[in-house]
Image: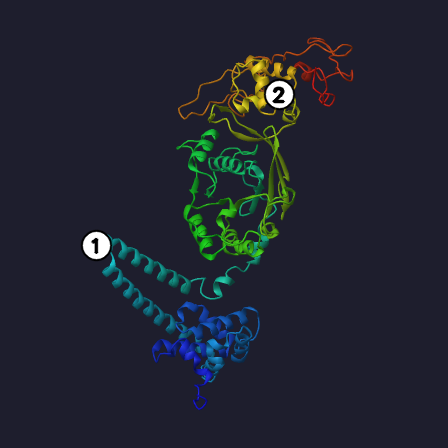
Amino acid sequence: MSNVRPFPAYEDYDDVEPRRASLEDVAEQWLIAAILDSPRGYAEAAEVIDRDDLTNHGYRLIWDTAGQLIADQREAHALAVRFEIERMGRLAEIGRGRLIDDLAAVAIPAGMAGKLAEKVAKLARAWRASAFAVRYRQAATESAADEVDEVLAKLLAEHVEAEQLKADRATGPGGGPAHILAAALDWGPFFSTDYTNVQLLPGKLLAPGQQIAVVGDGKAGKSLFLQEWVWRATTGQSALGDAPQAPLRVLYIDAENGHPELQQRFRSFGAGPQTMGTLTYLSFPPIRPLDTPGGGQDLLAVAKAVGAQVVVIDTVSRFIGGEENSADTWLALYRNTLMPLKAAGIASIRLDHFGKDGERGARGSSAKTQDVDHVWELRAQGGGILSLKRTHSRTGVGPDEFTLIRHSRKIGDDWVAGATRHAVMTHQDRAVLIEGTTEWLVDQLDRAGVDPAWGSPKVLGWCRENGVRTAKAKVEEAVRVRKSRPSPDLPPHLPYSPVTQTPPDARGVQDKLPGQTSPGEVGGMSGDVPATPPSPRLPPKEGGGGSAPGENKPICDICGHPLAPDWAARGYTTHLLCQPDRDEP
């Protein structure tokens, strides 16, 4: 076949996409020739059309390349575009360059680009309408009789919506570079805005529009903590000791927790069907991966539909499609989802897990921490105590660390309604919830739902079975404390404060007395509240300097120095720092 002459290589572009002697082809050809004549021609055309309005593959490639060169502030004449396409290894898509050579030979003034773009847009709209008619006719023929109306209505609605979006882009910011230029700062309002006076959201974890990550291991209770936070924030309640604010609108997407767990948790907070505030909770939603453009569009559309001010993603690894250890995955997550949310002024909180080495933070690529304003690490310290520490911060606004107490109470397999909450630890809490103290043991027994009527032998047996190491004297003391309390609903860190309880109201939430921070807890009350009785205590050791209750100057059994009167009144015979680490006899 050596005597056969092949066709010239430049004719390959006719095989890629046959050029039609049609109005669309002529209009597109002249338009591309115009934009190659001047960058101004591209800018005028981009305000009217986008690449999808071009029907020819080669024209779309030239359009994209010219637009990228202009965005990079480089020359975009025909020769530069040809060289750039050749550099990308895509010259075969334009007939080895012959297509662009032909276009460059057509003399079309750049000033004609706008008019030609309008012609292309009109012809593209007619082409889309023709394609829609084919789909509509096919659906009418192939759909079942009882479904045809619904199918056709859906097709028509989708077509109308798509055309409306096209029209919006052509008439407002959104066509070509105009929608990008809309992000330009207006210097007057910019410098007249006081960005130093920031009103942090409830709990001071983040400011409006910021993005944070909450990281912890599977046993720390990240979801439980965030679920209570959003419930309080969306119902206008105080969170983490902060003053109540107007209810936030929160969108929570969850691919971790089943419905039984969610119901149990919200009931334990004191929530019910009529007290869920402005919270929108999506359980296992069919959202596309958030590291893809489609997933970002899904989440942004839902967030705007519900008017969300904050979006919570639980857990972020369940909503991505890429490799978790790849930096590209997290860069794509930011570009496709987090950046559009931030641009819309919507704050976001994403939950994540520690890696194998918890000291190194969240598992996966280090790129995770580069796109958020704050990273909070939640760690369980034992005894219901949690550490919430900010390890990365872009702004430094707000506190850097919280020490929290997770209050809860269980009866059998059920958590008591309204008894679960996270509170910021006070100085007094730090003193009484130290592991090994009587109060700590009382707290452990309350959390486990151990019957307050149990005697010392049964409690000792429970401690051995559950690995709770404590002295017999501590167990006996804890048993006396639990039996002497007027109500088992008293918080474990106030075991000696008798309070007259009011019955639950119609919603199952217990009434509070003035000054209470939770049902049964009193802070700084006076008047009709009975005086706090002293705790039963063991006799002082031989030779110790301790004094009996009622003496004016109680003395520490260990160091012999005076005890604080309020400390001694609670039944303690040693200073906190003097208390020996060994078991008592």
Question: Dot 1: within a 10 Å radius of its alpha carbon, few (fewer than 14), some, or many (20 or more) residues?
Answer: few
User: Which corner quadrant holds the C terminus?
Assistant: top right
- Look at the image and tell me whether residue 148 can be seen: yes
Say whether marks 1 and 2 touch (CB < 8 Å).
no
The residue singled out by tag 1 in the image is: 145
Vertical placement of 339 versus 477: above or below? below
Vertical placement of 192 versus 136: above or below? above
Q: Identify the residue shown where x is 64% and y is 40%.
A: 400
Q: Position of residue 431 (x, y in %)?
A: 66, 24
Front residue of 50/119: it is: 50
Position of residue 353 in the picture relative to residue 573 (left or right): left
Q: Amino acid at mark 1?
A: Ala
Q: Quadrant of residue 214?
A: top right
Q: Identify the residue shown where x is 43% and y is 36%.
A: 277
Q: Amino acid at mark 2?
A: Glu
User: Which corner quadrant holds the N terminus?
Assistant: bottom left
Classify mark 1: helix, strand or loop.
loop
Q: How is this picture coloured?
A: rainbow
Q: Which mark is residue 439?
A: 2
Front residue of 104/445: it is: 445
Position of residue 370 in the picture relative to residue 418 (left or right): right
Classify mark 2: helix, strand or loop.
helix
Position of residue 442 in the picture relative to residue 47 (left or right): right
Front residue of 472/487: it is: 472
